[in-house]
Image: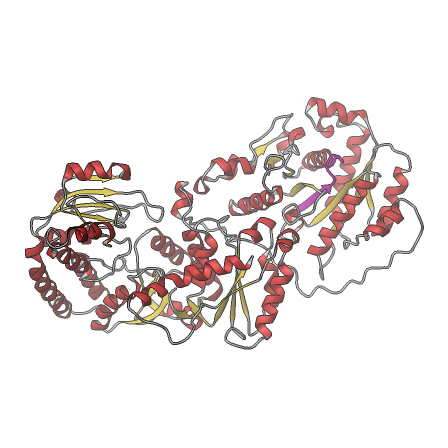
Amino acid sequence: MAEIAIYGKGGIGKSTVAANLSAALAKRGRRVLQIGCDPKHDSTRLLLHGDRITTVLDYIKGTGPDRHRLFDIVRTGVFGIDCLEAGGPEPGVGCAGRGILTTFQLLERLGIKDRHYDATIYDVLGDVVCGGFAVPIRREYAEKVYIVSSGEFMAIYAANNILRGLKNYDQNCSGRAGGIIFNSRALGEEDERIRRFCDAVELPLVASFPRSDLFSLCEAEGKSLVEAYPDSDLAGRFYQLAELIENQKYLYPANPLGDEDLEERILGHRRFSIPQPSLKPADREPPEDNGPAPAIFSKSLVAREPLMGCAFNGAISVTTQISGCVSIAHGPRSCAHIAYQTVTSTPRRFLLERGIVLPYTSSPPLVSSDMSEGLMIFGGIEELRAKIKTLKAGTGERAGKQVFFVLSTCPAGIIGDNVNLVLDLEDENTKIVPIRTDGNIQGDFLQGILLAYFEIARALIDRDVEAEEDTVNIVAEKAETYALYGSFAAVKEILDRFGIRVNCHFIRETSLEDIRRFKRGKLNLLAWGDYMGRSIREFLEKEYGAEFFDEPFPVGFAAASRWTRCLGERFHRSGEQVEAVLADYRARYRAEMERIKPKLSGKRVMIITVTQNIDWALQTALDAGMEIAFVGILSFSQDDLFTTELEDSIGELVLGYNPNKRDADIARVKPDLLLSPYPSAEDLGPVYQDTITYSPEAGFFSGLVLARRWAEIFNMNLAEGWKKDEGLFRKYYA
């Protein structure tokens, strides 16, 4: 498939040339796609008889990522030519270059290249060749680049800038410039200027189109000249150009002039010789920027909900869990600082609540490429490369690491920095894993977690490792939850009783070697069965054939009993061994419940929560003799799958609960205890409050943790003692 970029100054006629070239190729029997990359989105108008089509950016604005379909944005024009327009923001608003980046990422994800066109024509604005508008001349797109220019100095100036952009992408690589297409304005000395420019930059003049009223007539009719006047001399020139482009084998390196040289050479102020370019053999072509393009999106993106956090922070929370690595935040230092606070806030609070002070300074292996305001305009890849070289050659705790994760922030994504351009710094001792998160441009915190999981797996897991018996992996633990260690301890106690060992925590406080040997785990145990866990499981099953246990970590006595029985059967443990384990847990549970029950029996419970699986809490309340008067399930950005086996025991159940109705419902239901995601600072009268966490500790005794707290709450006689204490308790108790 030939991929051809047509660049040129705005208004120079590049869209007319592109449309007629597409028509000429199509009449030669070729299957053609034309992509307009100009915010004016008029590139394909002559191929659609003047009609305008929905641009990619308008489509993205109004359509969720899970509903994106290629046929919604591709329209077939004359001669069977497929047409597509990137579009752009309103003048003076946003960044049109970023829009081109977004367009190409979407097309790649939707599989545009799988349609196997004979020719793809990119019609690109060439006044400013910034990171966005330069996307079509990246090596994974355009194979041949042609520049449309008149003999006007500013048109030639734009053509020279385009060659500069092409040279930046083609350093140490073979050339891709096909030549100059001359679109005459019938001005004095125009022919001489364009020929002097071609000679100076060592490019051929591949086609010449004189000024003609036929072009204006075709514009008025909304048709290409090849369609409206197929037998004209001008149409013949487009046929010749199409044939030349198809058959052109030798392409030229970009050899732009300096600004002063350009003015002196083209305007004819004085003559001088142009030095020949020094070409070096290609050591390595710039890598493709394939981007994350996951098949799985976070729930917030799918449901078009407000984003919770940013993808960059979500990814950092995963990559910093792997020892022997450095995570490099490609962006301003403030982004790395905020990520540092996010990653360390949970463990710092966890230790502080227990009165533990570390005797040394501990910090995650996270550094910044220190992108400044200037770099956000002009690009920061060289600074990123310098940071990696410094880390490779330096000394100290973070030097000599085996793996560098390179994660992009919002500013890097906006200007189109391609973090894959640092891959040539890899060597036998260094692995570089780019993860394009682009702050919250790519999505929310959960989306960043998913992106990190996917890219880490693809880069580090050894597919050839053999599985071992009685070995499991723990998958999709949440490093930011307080229940992390308690949940694993509860599950490990069950595994130890069955003689089952843990191979790898994927991904939590683990090593490179553990991740490399991921497939040594015979079975995978999912820590959480929420949207995040289900997405990671789906990915590992599809990409690595990973076998998963049917249920995630169990929460509550009933779920833990089922889980333990199934685990025993899966690893062929005897029924006697399994029942002995269950009997021990049952005795411990009943003894504790008998102690608590007298303090809770008969109390009415009202629950308002984002937690989708609360049967463990409901069963605990029922075992304690409590009445479940009301349950309201709030909409939640991290999950969307509420299930219960205890609906008959719930007095009133409301899904999609409106929190604004809480006070009225409390007055109506008259509960003794209100369970919610966080305590209210308001005085709710005689109602006690407690929290019900989204991520409870796993195991047989999950509910007992709550029940003990409830018993302590009701054991407090708030009516006695100082009346002020009662008010303070209701206001501040957590």
Along the line of sight, the residue nearer the viewer: 107 or 90: 90
Q: Is residue 337 left or right of residue 712?
A: right
As drawn, which residue projects farthest toward the right?
A: 270
Quadrant (top left/top right/bottom left/bottom right) for the C terminus: bottom left
Q: Is residue 647 left or right of residue 197?
A: left
Q: Is residue 5 magenta?
A: yes
Q: Is residue 416 left or right of residue 235?
A: left
Number of numbered labels in the structure image: 0
Q: Is residue 181 magenta?
A: no
Res 610 visible: yes
Asked which quadrant contains residue 543, the reply is bottom left
Does residue 174 lie above or below 627 as drawn?
Answer: below
Q: Please name the colour scheme applied to the rendered image.
A: secondary structure
> What residue is rendered at 22% in x and 52% in y?
728
Does residue 456 lie above or below 602 as drawn?
Answer: below
> What residue is rendered at 80% in x and 41% in y?
154
Residue 593 position, x and y percent, is 10, 60
Image: magenta residue range:
3-14
Q: Is residue 227 left or right of residue 601?
A: right
Along the line of sight, the residue nearer the viewer: 548 or 127: 127
Asked which quadrant contains residue 194, the reply is top right
Residue 184 position, x and y percent, is 83, 35
Does residue 201 lie above or below 573 as drawn?
Answer: above
Along the line of sight, the residue nearer the viewer: 7 or 662: 662
Residue 345 position, x and y percent, is 38, 61
> What residue is rendered at 10% in x and 48% in y?
603
